[in-house]
Image (spheres, rainbow, N blue to C red):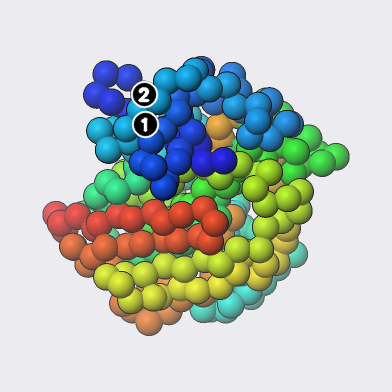
Amino acid sequence: MRIARYGDGRTDFWAAVDPDSGRVQVIRGEIEDWGPRVSADGAGAVPLTGEDRDAAGLRLLMPTRPGAKVVCLGATYAKHVEGLGREMTGQPAGFWKPFSALLDPEDTIVYPAITKALDYEVELTIVVGTERVDHTDPMRSVLGYTVGNDISLRDLQFAGSVTGMDMFSAKSADRSSGVGPWIVTRDEFGESSPDLLLTLSVNGEERQKDRTSSMAWPIDFLLRWADERTTLSTGDIVMTGTPAGVAYEDGRYLEPGDVVEATIERIGTLRNTVGPRP
């Protein structure tokens, strides 16, 4: 099932999406109310109100709760790490992204004034569905998956801080990193890590292409690893890293007006346009 969050100008709400008909079925309550049941029992546990609405008159919002934790796990694809001039280690590289850095589907990426090297990263993104992650079986704590585009300020990332990289400056820009368009529930993929094609294009030109099976660690390992370091709960998201092909490798950074499309097989496409340079 596809589950999205919408706004109608008066209120925000969750709904089950039928992309073929363009209609949505309103869900009763917030993600904290029904997320644990859906994680345990599948899409059949979604509490529909019976209200049917036309998606055309609604604003599509990022599919997570306001104020959610946003954990990013980098260095999970070997070729990407090689392209950054680094070597793989025995664990991912974790860092925070503030909620203010997230961007709704189809919104404009705000071009930060402090960078000249705006980069993109398509990422499979986990949406946590339970109040606590079950470390004995972390997959049962996955509500579903969505698409993320972890926008990065590369000139600041490698600006020569004493620790080697400045991830705060690189990853925190307000209204830069898109998430969406919706959550596809875990029961659509089975109980193991899904093997999905990821692509990212800029103005129709494909820049990134790989499969999630290329990740060095499976979803259950990544979710447990993240939760061991910060407690995750319903509605929090974990971005799982990006494959090779980012702009840092060839210097073709994003420019104002560029249309960036991040697509993950069986989930959907996240489409954002880069705004003007200040």
Is residue 254 placed above or below 13 in the rendered structure? below
Is residue 251 placed above or below 110 in the rendered structure? below
Q: Is residue 253 visible?
A: no
Where is residue 15? Give x, y as percent. 46, 30
| Disc number for residue 6 | 1
Quadrant hosting residue 174: top left
Answer whether labels 2 and 1 touch (C-beta < 8 Å): yes
In the drawing, does residue 182 fall left or right of residue 213? left
Question: Mark 1: which amino acid?
Answer: Tyr
Please name the residue that numbered disc 2 is placed on. 12
Question: Mark 2: which amino acid?
Answer: Asp
Is residue 203 placed above or below 230 in the rendered structure? below
The structure residue drawn at horizontal position 49% and vertical position 23%, both measured from the top left corner, is 27
The structure residue drawn at horizontal position 32% and vertical position 62%, both measured from the top left corner, is 260
The 10 Å Cα crowd at callout 1, few under 14, some 14 to 19, many 20 or more, is many
Where is residue 147? Give x, y as percent. 48, 52
In the drawing, does residue 152 fall left or right of residue 83? left
Cα distance, mark 2 to mark 1? 5 Å
Q: Which quadrant would the N terminus be assigned to in this image?
A: top right
